[in-house]
Image (cartoon, rainbow, N blue to C red):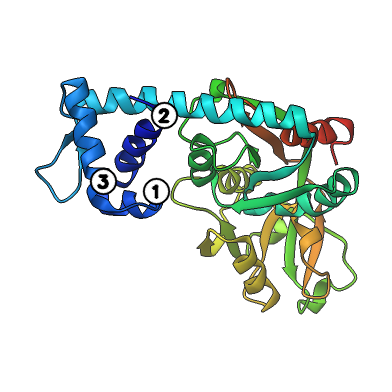
Amino acid sequence: MDLRQLKYFVTIAQEEQVTRAAKILNMEQPPLSRALKQMEEELGVTLFDRTGKRLKLTDAGRLLRQKAELLLYQFEEAMKEVKEREEGVSGVLSIGSVVSCISLLPKRIEQFRNRYPQITFKIAEGDHFYLGEQLDRRSIELIVARLPFEAMHDDQEYHVLTLPSDPFVVVIPSAWTQYESVTSIRMREIADFPFLTLKTDKTMRMHQQVMNECKRHGFEPNIICECSSVAIIMSLVAEGIGATVFPKSVMSSFPSTIVKMLDIEDADFQSDVGILWLKNRYLSKSAQLFIEGFRESPF
C-alpha cells in the first residue's frame, strides 16, 4: 500500500461516495473502485459498509482513516517545509476570521505584503465552529477570533496569542438627531432602544456578555432582532431600525455617516481577541511571520 492509495481511501471516506471521490481525484470511477477493493483484499478487512446509499466506515475503516490522514498530513507538511527552506517566504497564507474581527486584518495584511510581496492571502469568514472545522481540516492555518474560542476542540488543543482587549460601544443610527452632539451614553439609557444582537445557534459568547452587562445595570434590552451577520446588523442600524452594542474595532469597517458610535460612560466591559492555531501541527513560515507581526505590534 502506498500514499496514493491512502489518498484514494481518505477521499472516499470524506465524500462517502466513490463517484464524487473520483471527480475530486480527477479520475474515472471504475479504477477507483478497483483500487478500493484491492486495498481491502490486501488488508483482509472490509473498510466500508455498502448497505446504504452512502458508504459508511467500518471500525477498521475508521482506524485506517485516522492513521492515513495523519500520514498524508505529515508527508504534505514535510514537503512544504523542505520547499520553504529552499525557496524562502512565498505561497498562499490561508487564515480565518470571525466577522467581528475582519476589521483587524486589512492594515495588517497591507503591512505584511509590503514586507513579503510574494505572499498571497486566502481568507475564510465564519463563526467559531465553522472556522474550527476549517482549521482541523487544514484548510486554514490561523484564526482571528473573539475569546474564548467556542469550537469543537478543548482549549488545550490551541496555541493562543492574546491581543489587546477591545472595549464595547453603543452603535445607533445617524438619523437619531437627538444624539447628534452626544459622544457617550450610560447603559441605562439604552434600556428602551429597539435592540439588535449578534448571535448564532452555536456561538453566543458576545451576546451573553452584552446581556449580562444590561442585567448588571438593572434591565433586559428590548431585543427586536437576533442576527449572525455583523454587516446585516449594521445595515439595519443604518436604516434606523434600532441600536446595537459592538466591540469598538468593528466600527472601522463602517463609515460614521451611516451609523454613530457612542462610548459607554458607566461600563468598562471588554471583548477579548486572539490569534489561534492548532498545537502539534506544522506552521508555515508565512504563518509564523504573520503571528510574529502581531507580537511586535498587537494593533
Name the residue beneath numbered marker 3. Answer: 31
Image: 255 above or below 45 = below
Q: Position of residue 197 (x, y in %)?
A: 58, 58
Out of 296 and 191, give the one closest to the viewer: 296
Few, some or many residues within 10 Å of mark 3 (<14, 14–19, 20+): few
Dots 2 and 1: beta carbons under 8 Å? no
Out of 88 and 53, give the one closest to the viewer: 88
Find residue 291 and report its image quarter: top right
Name the residue beneath numbered marker 2. Answer: 3
Q: Amino acid at mark 1?
A: Leu
Q: Position of residue 105 (x, y in %)?
A: 77, 50
Can you tell which of label 1 and label 3 is closer to the viewer?
3
Residue 163 visible in rendering = no
**Measured Cα–Cα span from mark 1 to mark 3:** 11 Å
Tell me the residue at 76%/76% (across/down): 176
Quarter of the image with the C terminus is top right
Q: Is residue 116 left or right of residue 80?
A: right
Name the residue beneath numbered marker 1. Answer: 25
First along the sequence among labels 2 and 3 = 2
Q: Amino acid at mark 3?
A: Pro
Q: Residue furthest left?
A: 51
Tell me the residue at 22%/49% (across/down): 30
**Measured Cα–Cα span from mark 2 to mark 3:** 16 Å
Q: Position of residue 29 (x, y in %)?
A: 26, 52
